[in-house]
Each structure stands twice: as C-alpha cells, then as structure tokens.
C-alpha cells in the first residue's frame, strides 16, 4: 500500500531538542546449549520411541524464528533416518503465511528451512481432517498429511504467550492445537474468547493428543541472547507435565526491559519472526488482546519504525503502537496481516497508529505526547526488536538509576541522536 507524503505540522520540529542516547547492555541468564546437534542427537537416541523403521514421519515447523533452527531440523531428520524412518517437514502455523500452502512454504524458506538445507521433503498443504471434538462440540482438526503419516514429531519453542496466561502457553500443546490445525483449526479454536485460552488449549490439546499419531515432542527454550538455553525430547505422555515445568523456566529466563517506567519505546522492527504479535507484550508491556498479566512495565508511547523483511509484510501487532512511519505502511501486506488478525479475532492488532513521514517526526510527537519535564529529559528506550534486548539504547535520563547496578553495563557516553537528510535515524 502506497501513501503519499503526510502533510503534518509538528510544532517546533525544527528546533526540537531530542534527548541524548547511550548504548547499554542488560544482563540475563546465560544458560545455553553448547552443541545443538550433539544434544539433540543424544536425546533422540535415548528417547523411548517405538520401532519406526519404514515409517513416514511428519515434523512440524512453525513461523517463529528459532536459533539454530536449520541445524535442529537437519539433526532430527538424520536421527529419524538412522532409525529407518522416512521423515518430511510440514508447515504448522495456523493461518500464518496468508493461510496458503505457498505462503507457509515461503515463511519456512525465509527462515532458511528448505529441502536442501534440512535434507528432507517439505510438504506444504492446507487440507485438514476432523479428528476430535471438544466438550462443547467444537471440531478439532489436524493437517491431513500429518494425520495420514505414521508418526508426528511436534517441534516448537516453549515460551510465554503474547495474549494470555496459563500453564500451557506457546509450545508443543499449542502447536498441536493451532499449528497442526492450519487456518481452519485455528479459526475453530479462536472462536472461543482468547480470555478462555488457558482452559481451551489444554482441553483441545488432550483431545488431539489422543486422536493423532504423535511420536514425540521436542521443545526448545530461547534465552535473552538469541541462543537455545535448553532442548527437551519427550514422549507423548510426557508432553503435558514436562511442558508445564519448562514454561516456568522459560518465564524465569525471559529477557525483559529492566525499567518499570518508560516515556517512549522505539522499536526498530516488528515481525512474525520475532513474536506472534509482531512485538512481544512480555517485553513492551502492551497487548491488544485485553488479557491481564502484561503490565510489568508502564510505557507511555510506542513508536514502531518498520516491519522486518522476514515477516513478508505481515505487520500484525502494529495496533499496539502509537506512531509509525510511511515506510512501514508501504511495506505492509494487508492480506497477510488481516488474515492473521481475523483468524485470531484480535482485530486491534492490525489497527494502524498515527502515520508520520519519518523517524524525526514520529519521535518528536511521541516525546511530546509522553509529557516529560523537558524533551531532553524524556525516558526513551530504543530496541532493535523485542527479541534483541540484551544491547539497547537509552536516554541519559536513565543513567542515575543504572549506575552501580550489576544487571547493566554502560558503553561510552551519551551522544546526540543523528538524523539523515530524509529525517530518518542513520544508525
């Protein structure tokens, strides 16, 4: 979508005084898997799996960015082949990728997941089959190719969800319920209020676990440094109890912004590769779902600069921002964005904020609207995305509360914000 230049008058823009910024590191738990392939190989070899020689095995692949994901899939494929199985990959991402077979295959390709890189076929289709029902009669679906296989390896990242709180949030159970259900399954489950997902997901998951040929689950947890903190291979019977325990760990090591109050949060990029909602409310403190539990920090204004190339124009989550740019809107794929939000029934996620011509205009309005004592004293935080919050930029107003704290390291001295001739940030 192309928009013309916005004729907007920002009072005092030419003489506006922006706060000086400085780069800092936030320090988090550094648990990490040293060798992903070796760890996965060992756990797969030790797993109490049935004889799968000569069997076709489907492996789920989602839309979220996961560190070492190509290495992980290649290792899983190799481990299954060593047992005599014939593995293949299926996209399992609900309505993402416009809900089409081609779109979902493209999402995997953007992650580097190709038949060549992982050494196995990728079979992307949209057809599902009904396999179970919930207590209220809601039908539950499974990808037809997966259901017709001899076994399914459910692979996913276990992490706090971006729209609800519960014992099972984003992880293997949700992958079984929504990922494998494709768009039709996602729509059926999302037909229940997301406020009830903490009950819906486990109920649907147990019904599907009993009705689908799940071979095993492989859950991974990501640390705040974009690395894998742990890998767990589990049998079908272990999925529910172990995922519940792993989620507690994932929440404990989750990277966050370590400031309770922020005037302006600048997010360089949002995207499905970072979070299901484009930017993770566990980091931003903003959710469009209306579900409680995301108010750990208070952010007055959020400015989102762009949508990531890997998100392929899906700007789901832009509705949580207050300001954005023409270039983000120009890069939006409205079909992809709307398909995602219509399926989830959280339409506010696709709502457009105020659109400005460039970063300078948007930042000035965001700071003015947060009502700091003076603009140069505004509490401004800038992050690359909500997955990259180890190294961030903060305004010098934060320095007094950072000084002497072990969880921070300050690099250099504060310096002025640099805008190019086009009004956009230069770094």
Image: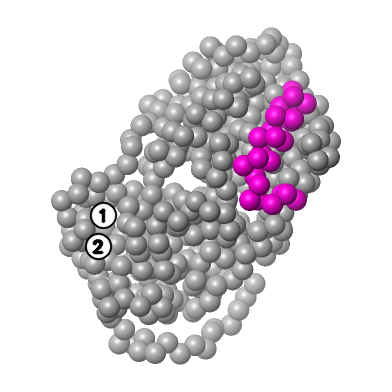
Q: Is residue 117 left or right of residue 207?
A: left
State how the image is colored.
Answer: one colour
For marks 2 and 1 on the same chain, the one whose residue lies earlier in the sequence: 1
Residue bearing mark 2? 398
Task: Inspect this view and state whether residue 172 appears.
Answer: yes
State yes or no: discs 2 and 1 in contact (Cβ < 8 Å): yes
Which corner quadrant holds the C terminus?
A: bottom left
SS at mark 2?
Answer: helix
Q: Residue at x 63, y 19 (%)?
A: 237
| Vertical comparison of 400 with 105: above or below | below
x, y (%) of residue 326?
53, 74
Q: Is residue 194 magenta?
A: yes
In the image, what residue occupies the spot 33% across and 37% down? 29
Question: Residue 24: which numbered mark, if any?
Answer: 1
Viewer-proximal residue among 77 and 338: 338
Q: Position of residue 62 (x, y in %)?
A: 62, 40
Residue 160 shown left or right of residue 399 in the figure: right
């Amino acid at each position: 979508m192309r928009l013309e230049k916005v004729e907007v008058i920002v009072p005092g823009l030419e003489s506006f005084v922006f706060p000086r910024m400085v780069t800092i590191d936030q320090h988090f738990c550094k648990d990490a898997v040293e060798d992903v392939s070796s760890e996965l190989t060992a756990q797969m070899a030790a797993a109490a799996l049935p004889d799968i020689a000569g069997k076709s095995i489907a492996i789920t692949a989602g839309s979220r960015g996961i560190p070492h994901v190509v290495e992980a899939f290649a290792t899983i494929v190799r481990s299954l082949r060593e047992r005599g199985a014939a593995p293949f990959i299926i996209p399992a991402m609900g309505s993402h990728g416009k809900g089409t077979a081609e779109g979902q295959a493209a999402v995997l390709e953007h992650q580097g997941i190709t038949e060549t890189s992982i050494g196995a076929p990728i079979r992307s289709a949209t057809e599902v089959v009904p396999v179970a029902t919930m207590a209220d009669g809601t039908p539950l679906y499974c990808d037809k190719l997966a259901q017709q296989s001899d076994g399914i390896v459910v692979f996913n990242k276990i992490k706090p969800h971006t729209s609800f709180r519960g014992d099972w949030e984003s992880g293997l159970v949700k992958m079984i319920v929504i990922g494998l259900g494709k768009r039709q399954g996602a729509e059926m489950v999302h037909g229940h209020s997301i406020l009830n997902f903490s009950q819906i997901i486990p109920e649907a998951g147990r019904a599907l676990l009993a009705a689908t040929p799940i071979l095993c689950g492989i859950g991974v947890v990501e640390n705040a440094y974009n690395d894998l903190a742990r890998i767990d291979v589990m049998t079908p019977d272990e999925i529910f109890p172990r995922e519940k325990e792993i989620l507690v760990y994932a929440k404990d090591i989750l990277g966050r912004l370590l400031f309770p109050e922020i005037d302006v949060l600048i997010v360089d990029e949002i995207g499905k590769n970072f979070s299901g909602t484009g930017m993770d409310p566990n980091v931003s403190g903003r959710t469009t779902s209306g579900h409680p539990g995301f108010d750990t920090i208070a952010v007055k204004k959020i400015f989102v600069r762009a949508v990531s190339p890997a998100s392929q124009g899906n700007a789901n989550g832009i509705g949580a921002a207050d300001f954005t740019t023409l270039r983000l809107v120009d890069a939006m794929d409205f079909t992809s964005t709307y398909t995602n939000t219509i399926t989830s029934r959280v339409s506010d996620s696709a709502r457009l904020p105020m659109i400005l011509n460039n970063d300078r205009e948007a930042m000035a309005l965001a700071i003015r609207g947060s009502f700091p004592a003076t603009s140069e004293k505004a509490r401004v935080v800038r992050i690359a995305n909500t997955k990259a919050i180890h190294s961030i930029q903060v305004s010098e107003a934060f320095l007094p509360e950072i000084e002497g704290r072990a969880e921070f390291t300050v690099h250099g001295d504060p310096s002025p914000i640099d805008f190019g001739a086009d009004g956009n940030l230069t770094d």
